[in-house]
Image (cartoon, rainbow, N blue to C red):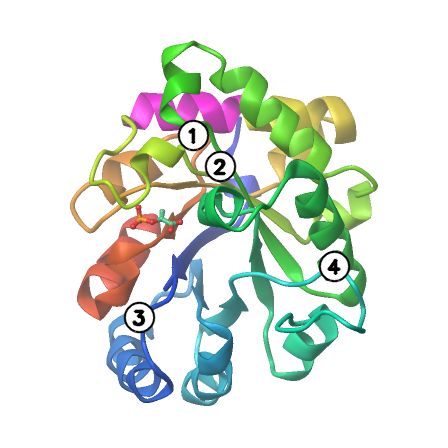
Amino acid sequence: MNKKLRKAIIAGNWKMNNTPAQTKKTINELKPLVEKCKKCEIVLCVPFVDIQNAVKAAKDTNIKIGAQNVHFAEKGAYTGEISAQMLLECGVEYVIIGHSERRQYFGETDETVNKRVLAALNAGLKVILCVGEVLTEREQDVTSEVVSRQTKIALLGVDKKMLKNVVIAYEPVWAIGTGKVATADQADEVCGIIRNVLAEKYGAKAAEGTTIQYGGSMNAQNSAELLAKVNVDGGLIGGASLKPADFAQIVKNAQ
Ligand code: PEP
């Protein structure tokens, strides 16, 4: 197992936080703190209405901009939705798909996650695919089955070449926004299970080359231990990504 084969990626998920004006201010604060961080890819996934200001503020820097969702249709009568092409034209490079908050509150299923993954990849976006178990599933010892099923269904129709544009975020739902963090060993174990699912489908080399992040209350203090694990190649960060100094510290810990 060789961590050096894959890119470390730290992505912030701002969720429904920051107005366009606050976006400009926050990114301008973050820029000098991470400008020397060349070994780790830095992504900020912002609300749709913040994309324009985020792209402008991050221009000519090492910060890439992502969205938090995308619709699976190319265009049409889907009031309130945003297509992959629209995101691309706005300068978006990454999109989060299947976040547990979308599964929990907005009816996202493994099947709709798969449709969104295909639409995003076919359009040329990079995908951060979220998988993770809820607390009862962990307590019932079915974490492995749950994340394996979510990963397999999400990647139906995704071939080896397309996999290069997929990052997987293992996010135990019980750890998101709760302050409860998975132990570094728990995170490593499940990221390893996901890597085995990838190896079965795409072969060991492709699995070894895929970035798998941990997400769930990762912060400036606990990130070094989590990121040191062999199967944890980065983080998807919610709350701590809203504070430039904390987010920058996590990026430094990933280098
Ligand atoms: C997330 O939203 O993906 C997340 C991990 O949130 P938090 O870091 O706040 O738990």
Location of residue 88 in the rendering, given as x and y in whole percent from the top left corner: 67, 76
Chain part drawn in magenta: 184-193
Which residue is denoted by mark 2 in the rendering?
3
Which dot marks residue 34? 3
- Element class at badge 2: helix
Location of residue 34 in the rendering, given as x and y in whole percent from the top left corner: 31, 70
Q: Name the side, left or right, on which 63 lies relative to 185.
A: right
Which residue is denoted by mark 4 in the rendering?
72
Q: Name the side, left or right, on which 192 lies relative to 163.
A: left
Amino acid, disc 2: Lys
Which residue is denoted by mark 1 in the rendering?
230
Amino acid, disc 1: Val
Foreground label between 4 and 1: 4
Q: Main secondary structure of the magenta part?
A: helix
Q: Earlier in the sequence, mark 4 or mark 1?
A: 4
Q: Earlier in the sequence, mark 3 or mark 1?
A: 3
Amino acid, disc 3: Val
Q: Earlier in the sequence, mark 3 or mark 2?
A: 2
Q: Nearer the viewer, residue 209 or 25?
A: 25
Q: Nearer the viewer, residue 238 or 207?
A: 238
Q: Residue at x 47, y 24 (%)?
A: 190
Location of residue 123 in the rendering, given as x and y in whole percent from the top left corner: 78, 66
Q: CA distance from mark 1 to mark 2?
A: 6 Å
Q: Earlier in the sequence, mark 4 or mark 2?
A: 2
